[in-house]
Amino acid sequence: MRSYEITYPSVNTESHIKNITAFVIEPDRLNAHTGAMLITHGWGGNRLDYRETMAYACEEFNLICLSVEFRQSGFDFDPVKGLGAYVPYDASFYQVFDVLNGLRTILDLRPGVNRRRLFLYGGSQGGHITLLSTIYAPQTFAFAYATSPVTYIESHIQKWAGREFAAYEFSIRNVMDHAEFIDCPLRLEHGTIDDIVPDHHTRLLAAKLESLKKSFTVEYIEGGGHSLAPVTSRLETFKRIAPEPLKTLTREGDDDFLRGSIVEIPCQDRVLRIDWSKPTDSIELFCWK
């Protein structure tokens, strides 16, 4: 395996792009089976948080693993400690584009990647970004795995963000509102004594997915906290669950990035329009109608 970092421009304003850095671990030799997996850290974390998970997935499943240092968290907030987050905080909107733009960048850099094997993994806010990514790019991923995920902006999370949200802004961050867009198998897990992101986030989503007859599995770790400790750990459950889907699942057809899809997501009185044909830093990448 080899590791390196990439920096690329992500959508911001016409005059000022936002440079984003990502950490990459990839196999020494890429082949026709080599896929890619986004592994996304949580609120206030950084791109190095999941190094062990990335290394395991790379070696065991022949995947280029990418962890994006999305804006307003980690080293972007504190270049020395890599810990903490800005206030006000955007709470998984621009951050989703930062992460998906990282995948688009690595796919451009490694054009031989097997695009039928694109996967997602994330915990906490990273789980939120993972789930929203399946909505923003619904024809892209073969499998997504969210551990202890945020699924909507409830009152205590809004306090962390330190800002107000309009109705359409709450909606675009609410996975239940748009779960019909999810078109890949999901793995959900949550500790029952999580005092940071309570398990009702996953329970509400599981009920919605069940009503929509979506393909998913869910596990509640009895006595587990936000990291699933002291019962287990996120890495341990990943090693237990990931082998079957990551070895067997693929997706047919071109992904949203390759086909330059237009994705429109209704949100209360507005519609988010995403144009995946636009460059990562284009102000036309998305707009509100």
Image: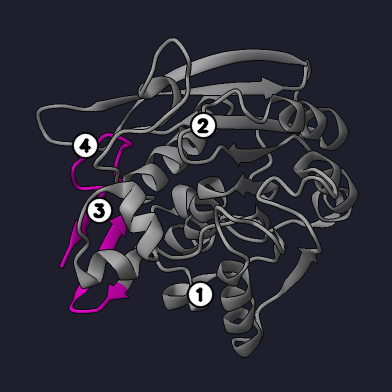
Badge 1 local density, few (<14 within 10 Å), some, or many (20+)? some
- Please tell me whether residue 105 is drawn above or below residue 211 in the rendered image: above
Separation of disc 2 and disc 1 at Cα?
A: 26 Å
Instruction: Reply yes or no: does residue 287 show up in magenta.
Output: yes
Q: Residue at x 41, y 68 (%)?
A: 174
Q: Amino acid at mark 3?
A: Phe
Of circles 4 and 3, the one toward us is 4
**Helix, strand or loop status at disc 4:** loop
Q: Amino acid at mark 4?
A: Asn
Judged from this view, the residue extending furthest toward the left is: 15
If you read the primary sequence from the N terminus, does the residue marked by circle 4 or circle 2 appear first?
A: 4
Q: Quadrant of residue 25?
A: top right
In the picture, which quadrant includes the N terminus?
A: top right
Q: Quadrant of residue 17?
A: top left
Separation of disc 4 and disc 1 at Cα?
A: 26 Å
Separation of disc 3 and disc 2 at Cα?
A: 26 Å
- Please tell me whether residue 89 is drawn above or below residue 210 in the rendered image: above
Camera-side residue of 133 and 228: 228
Q: Amino acid at mark 2?
A: Gly
Separation of disc 4 and disc 3 at Cα?
A: 11 Å
